[in-house]
Image (cartoon, rainbow, N blue to C red):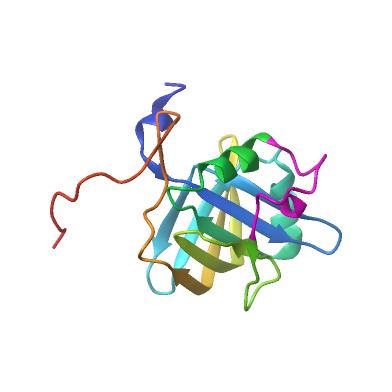
């Protein structure tokens, strides 16, 4: 059962947080909408990750759904630790300022969400952070980057429309 989660295709997201003393960006594979009214999304982050406690202290976070031409950002966000390097200062991460929260979003992403932390819960080996979306942006000309079974994909052929 260790690899059950790899069987779920996921949008590739970067979470950003800006705190008093530190900021960070990290890749997350588990992000999902959980409510329409009010608009709430969740991200799942292991407590050992540097971003985990930064979000709790900041009380807010950004989520950028990467475009399919941004896979290198996902790899950097997930393989480097903010404890040792300021990832947001790296030239590969082009940041776009947020309008409501302190954390920037990723320039060129498919979508960006500015979130106020509502709650967080410890569930198994991760914490679930629920954030109310205060502002969102979408670039419909871009296709999202998708992760499935540890491989990156672009969306394929459209097969129809859900009613």
Q: Is residue 81 part of the magenta span, yes or no?
A: yes
Q: Residue at x 39, y 59 (%)?
A: 142
123 left or right of 56?
left
Residue farthest right in this picture: 21
Magenta stretch, overall SS: loop
Residue segment shown in magenta: 80-94
Q: Residue at x 41, y 59 (%)?
A: 34
Q: Nearer the viewer, residue 36 or 62?
A: 62
Looking at the figure, which quarter contains the N terminus?
top left
Q: Is residue 157 part of the magenta span, yes or no?
A: no
Q: Residue at x 47, y 71 (%)?
A: 137
Q: Is residue 129 above or below residue 113?
A: above
Residue 85 x %, y %: 80, 43
Looking at the figure, which quarter contains the C terminus?
bottom left
Q: Is residue 85 above or below residue 130?
A: above
Residue farthest bottom in this picture: 99
Q: Nearer the viewer, residue 47 or 61?
A: 61
Residue 115 x %, y %: 57, 67
Residue 20 x %, y %: 84, 64
Q: Nearer the viewer, residue 122 or 5?
A: 5
Residue 61 x %, y %: 63, 62
Number of marks in picture: 0
Hey, which quadrant is residue 55 in on the image? bottom right
């Amino acid at each position: 059962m260790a690899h059950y989660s790899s069987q779920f295709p996921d949008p590739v997201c970067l979470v950003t947080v800006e705190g008093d003393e530190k900021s960070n960006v990290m890749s997350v594979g588990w992000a999902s909408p959980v409510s329409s009214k009010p608009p709430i999304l969740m991200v799942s982050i292991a407590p050992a990750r540097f971003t985990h406690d930064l979000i709790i202290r900041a009380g807010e976070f950004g989520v950028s759904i990467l475009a399919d031409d941004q896979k290198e950002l996902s790899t950097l966000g997930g393989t480097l630790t903010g404890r040792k390097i300021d990832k947001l200062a790296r030239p590969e991460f082009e940041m776009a300022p947020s309008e409501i929260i302190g954390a920037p979003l990723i320039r060129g992403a498919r979508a960006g969400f500015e979130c106020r932390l509502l709650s967080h819960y410890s569930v198994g080996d991760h914490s679930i952070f629920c954030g109310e979306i205060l502002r969102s942006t979408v670039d419909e000309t871009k296709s999202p980057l998708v992760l499935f079974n540890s491989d990156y994909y672009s969306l394929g052929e459209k097969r129809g429309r859900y009613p």
